[in-house]
Image (cartoon, coloured by chain):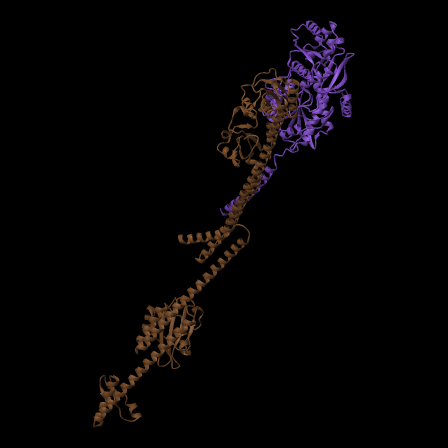
Chain colours: A purple, B brown
Amino acid sequence: MSGTRRSTMNKLDVSLGLGLVVMMITATWAAGCGSTDNQPLKIAVVLPLQITPGTEMLNAAQLALEEAGNKAGPYQVELLALDEFDESGSYTEEKARANAQTIVNDPDVVACLGPGFTAVAKMLTPLLNEAGIVMVAPSPTWPGLTKPGFVPGEPGIYYPTGRRNFFRVIPTDDLQGAVGALWARELGADLVYVVDDGQPYGQGVAGLFVEKAREIGLEVIVESADIKTTDYNELAMRIAQTQPDLIYFGGSATFGGPQLILALRNHGIPIPFMGPEGMMTSEVLDQAGAAAEGIYLTFGIVPFDQMGSRGAAFVEDYRAKYGEEPSAHAALTYDAMRVILDAISRAEDRRDRAAVLRAVAETHSFPGLSGDWGFDTNGDITTPVFSGYVVQDGEFVFKTILPTK
Amino acid sequence: MNEMNETRQRRRGRLRLNILGPIIFLTAVTILALTFVLVNQFLNLRDVAAQSQRETARRVATRLDAFLEETDLNVKATADGLAQVSDLATATEPSLVFALRRLLNRNVAVFEVTLVTPTGREVATLRRFGTKQTLGSEASQPWMESIRQGQPYRGPVTLSEYQLPVMIIAQPVLGPEGKEIGGLVVQVDLTTMWTVIADTRIGESGYAYIVDESGYLLVYQRLSDLSQRLTLAELIGSDADAILRGKSATYRGVNGVPVIGVSAPMSYKAWTVVAEVPRSEVYASVYHSSWLVGSALMASIAAMVLAVVIVDRRVIRRLGKLQTGVEMLASRQFGVQLQLPGNDELNTLAVAFERMAGQLQELYAELEHKVADRTRQLERRTVQLETAAEVSRAASSTLNTERLLSQTVELIADRFNLYYVGLFLVDEGGEWAVLQAATGEAGRQMMVQGHRLRVGGVSMVGWCTANAQARVALDVGEEAVRFDNPLLPDTHSEMALPLISRGRALGALDVQSTKEAAFDEADIAVMQTMADQVANAIENARLFEETQRLAQREQTISHITSKLRSAFNLETILQTTVQELGQALGASKAIVCLGTETTLLSHQDEAEPGDGEVKV
């Protein structure tokens, strides 16, 4: 009995001692757990991956990351590629919401490159704004995403927190309209006949052209067209009767641009024709054909051969890696990725999304492909650069660098 | 018994207190010291955090004040620039537009600027982006009253049609004569304030917000806060008043978690920048260290408990067992079996103690045995001495030898619990030792039989009387000189002591016991003393009898002599002589013969008188 009792006592002593040791070890182990410092950071890349510009843009983003050694400063970085189109090839609010959830719920994602389209940016920006995730977009040009004065509610509705998180490396359409007006004056126009396509993009660009044109003393005649209802021949005749020095089409190739060009040239009206970036597509060349010869187009990026050594190096590297010529949007995406990597390397806390956002907002004198630039308080680049193109022999031919003021 | 147990428990309690008390005391002191350190750390961290927050809040307030005041200055400078225009209504648009655009270029926060006449008619409007479609009248707007009074206007913060936070600033435009010729109405985009607040980080998770002059939440995490019109009191409760008065406080912050909050006033308007840091962050280092300290405390307590349990179990309880063993030993319970667990000094001590207890038990038993022996001896001596005294008294109090002998043997037999005691006296011829007194039935029979033993014969009494020395047979079977008395078959020890008086043996005291080795030296000495006393008494009695006999003879002689003196003839003399002698001697016949020796011998038979006859 006594022996049993002694044995039990000893076991109890041992148990107490072991319990104490286990408690201390567990506590020490618990204190050392939970570190994620070695996890690579992620940059979400939201682009239209089902179409060519999107894949080229992703290639450019990967090229920029590889050139940085897959690092932002000393920190390892990975890409999280997300398609901004759904399975049907459309951008929808559901798809934007799903992408936003993926981004927000992944604690390693500290920034988002994209999206490619203005419409997707309008859906995605407020969702990521709530999460404080910075976005650097390569191609959305709608000014209302960042600037007030265009559509009521914009841009405040995209920033429910009041803190801007959307930045873009491409100049906005309003500047394109202004650049067009300045170029029109440079071309010697005094009276400009402005036609918009009735779409938000076209109306916006046309309106900004008109504002700038009036500001610089040009006379403008404004008319709105609708591809479904407008008789472009009649429109061409009306334009001809006013004898303008230049016709400015505020719209895209999809909404009547080529039709108006054809109508003008078919009626022998040789008045110079100018359009924005939305007209600088193969549709114009295909549909308008020879009628498109000589038309002026403005574009929010300078050609590679005008970029100096940075542009040349990019083209060379891209060509070496992918075996093809990079597009203008690829160049913009390349810059967007480099801006994000630079911001992460400068952030106080690389894993703090707010810190990365602050670092992006504080970007200035960034050595972009088209020159040094930064972001203004709205999130737009401070020194946008435009190019003037002319269609010659069925091709878009760089003509000049256009001033914005 | 219960009292003893209580005392034991009390003592053990004191021992436990003496041993465990210092451990508990030191642990308690350690815990108190650590707690004191922790509390101090908490207080210091709170003060440091509050100071840091206040500095941040002041910095934010200063930055925003600078932003707003710069805008004000730009607007005022623009208004001053327009003072050279005498009449806004007739001024050319390009010059006005130039002035307004310069304001837009100077200050990125200015979104729209409108020049109005004192009647409220818009003269010119310019906005940073887009085009304001219509120009109209602003006569009914609240800032017009200030313009008319020549006072600047700072409106409330609202959400613009573009859902951006804006504030209307109006500045009167004074003409060359100092008269109000119109006003400059500027819509200022305050997004910068949200950006500054959003970018304000205090520590890891601290934040700031702005409360307006009426106590409404102005700038925080969402633009929609503006339209919700939430007061700080609604958000944080009664601490709002203290915070807005610049004091620091601990409360549940606007985001619902416990925070430490401080504030700093803005100078541009009566707005207040409030900085809050979650308490969990402020105290994180202490929490961390408190976790460590808490672990240390828990470990200390656990170690203390463990130490207490182990010390109690391994030392105190075992000491208690030892104590119990000692107490058992003190109460003469020598069969102590402590059975202490372990194999240490205490265990060794316990084993030694058990061994010592065993030895003590043996020693004590031996002592008890000796004491009992001594006691028995003492009792026996006492009895012997008492008996000797009684014998002495009897010897000194009587001259009756027969009674003395009888009392002596009875006393000795009774007090010494002897089987048999007999007292022999040597007869006058010195040939026999005749039994004079004896105890028991055997003694009575021997007395009747006239039991006697030859002096110097083969008996212990015979040897003793012959040699006037004691003879002791502790085992009668081995005694060569002994008379084997059939009346005393159970005798195993026998002692014959001489009754010596004046150097000669008057007889012997014979004592017999049924036990072997029943007599020791002391017994022999005491009984020899008694024998000596008896011998003296016998001698005295004999002397007394002799004296009396001599006295009687002298008296008889004197009587006869006196009778003879009174006789006058031989016959009478002879007759008197024969008669008196016969009477004195108690003789039944008395004869006086006269003649020679030969004649007398030849006529002896003739002269023999009959009984009671006196013949001369």
Q: Is residue A277 above or below residue B239?
A: above
Q: Nearer the viewer, residue B242 or B118?
A: B118
Q: Is residue A174 above or below residue B242?
A: above
Can residue A340 be seen in the rendering of this structure? yes
Q: Is residue B346 above or below residue A278?
A: below
Q: Nearer the viewer, residue A125 or A351?
A: A125
Tell me how many marks there are: 0
Q: Nearer the viewer, residue A356 or B134?
A: B134
Can residue B451 be seen in the rendering of this structure? no
Percent x, y of residue B613: 22, 86
Q: Nearer the viewer, residue B590 or B9?
A: B9
Percent x, y of residue B315: 51, 51
Percent x, y of residue B371: 43, 65
Residue at 28%, 84% in the rendered image: B548
Q: Quick check: B378 left or right of B21?
A: left
Q: Quick check: B475 left or right of B579?
A: right
Q: Is residue B326 above or below residue A310?
A: below
Q: Quadrant of residue A222?
A: top right
